[in-house]
Amino acid sequence: MSRLTHVTSGRYSPPAARRELVADSADGARLHVEVHGDEGAPAVVLAHGWTCSTAFWAAQVRDLAATHRVIAYDQRGHGRSPAARVHSTTALADDLVAVLGATLAPGERAVVAGHSMGGMTIMAAAGRPEFAEHAAAALLCSTGSSRLVAEAQVLPVRAGRARTRVTGAVLGSRAPLGPVTPVARKILKYATMGPGSAPDKVEACARIVHACPNGVRHAWSKVLAGLDLDAEVARLAVPTAVIGGTADRLTPIVHARGLAAALPNCVGLTELTGMGHMTPVEAPEAVTRAVRELTELYLHTTEKEKTP
């Protein structure tokens, strides 16, 4: 991972993995996977969002690896996973089940957490038998299942066709983001983070987002613009917690509330006051705590039930 893809010091610099591997997806896409922590520890799988990478989970990996086996992977085209020809929610689901199969033993379960497009990945995979085999519980952070462009509040104008059209053009732009400058940080903070976000958090997010290739960013923006996973939400039967920021402009809190109402087994909705879209970076303690609670409540129980 090059220096341009993440900060290199402090809490938001990604720790070195205990081991790395490649998971092969159904269409041949190769996914970079990192494993942190002891092999025998309770497993957690982390799926990052659009334009991000495994580095986005640095705070969670750092805190959880002492007591958990933390598995993080780069979505296709992001981080160290090569670009692929196919961009779809089916591909997202294929990739997740490939990672689960490559890192977990048959029947072994994990808590699966996803941020933004990573949460959509979990929804897309909800009906897969491989997901049912390996997922003990799920965490959906700052995500939604449909109407992403229509509900986005990146543009400070009244909701309607004009805002939706312009928002789609902005989010789907092919223009390069360029270097991380003071202006770039200000724009990224406004669009994706809460107004009180500290400079080190803004810097960490900017480095990661600006490292995403333009073509990859554009290709996935088209998938997100047409997203409709409402039916898949109804199939997400494992205990699922939802987290959202009240100042999120990309996936406003209405999405989190809608997911909590639609999920068949929602075990909690956490609304983080003043937080934006980048909750694992903006509120790392809250996200880490949610993962820990899910492992204590569901993963440990599952493992104990398997013990004769």
Image: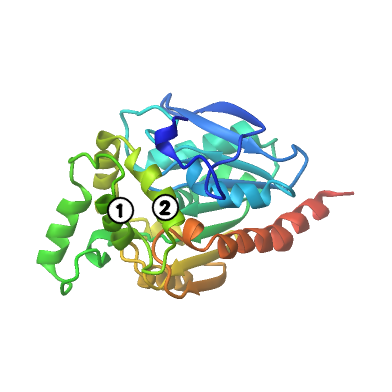
214 sits left or right of 207 in the view: left
- The residue lying toward the viewer, choosing from 202 and 103, is 202
Residue at left 86%, top 49%? 307
Q: Is residue 208 visible?
A: yes
In the rendered image, the vertical position of residue 158 relative to residue 304, given as above or below: below
Report helix, strand or loop for mark 2.
Answer: helix
Q: Quadrant of residue 14?
A: top right
Measure how far apart labels 1 and 2 are at the Cα level: 9 Å
Identified at 56% across, 61% down, the residue is 287
Indicate the position of residue 55 as horizontal and vertical percent values: 49, 42
Label 1's element?
loop
Res. 117 in view: no
- Residue 149 location in percent, x, y? 24, 60
Location of residue 168 (image quadrant)? bottom left
Q: What amino acid does circle 2 point to?
A: Met
* Residue where numbered disc 1 is placed: 227
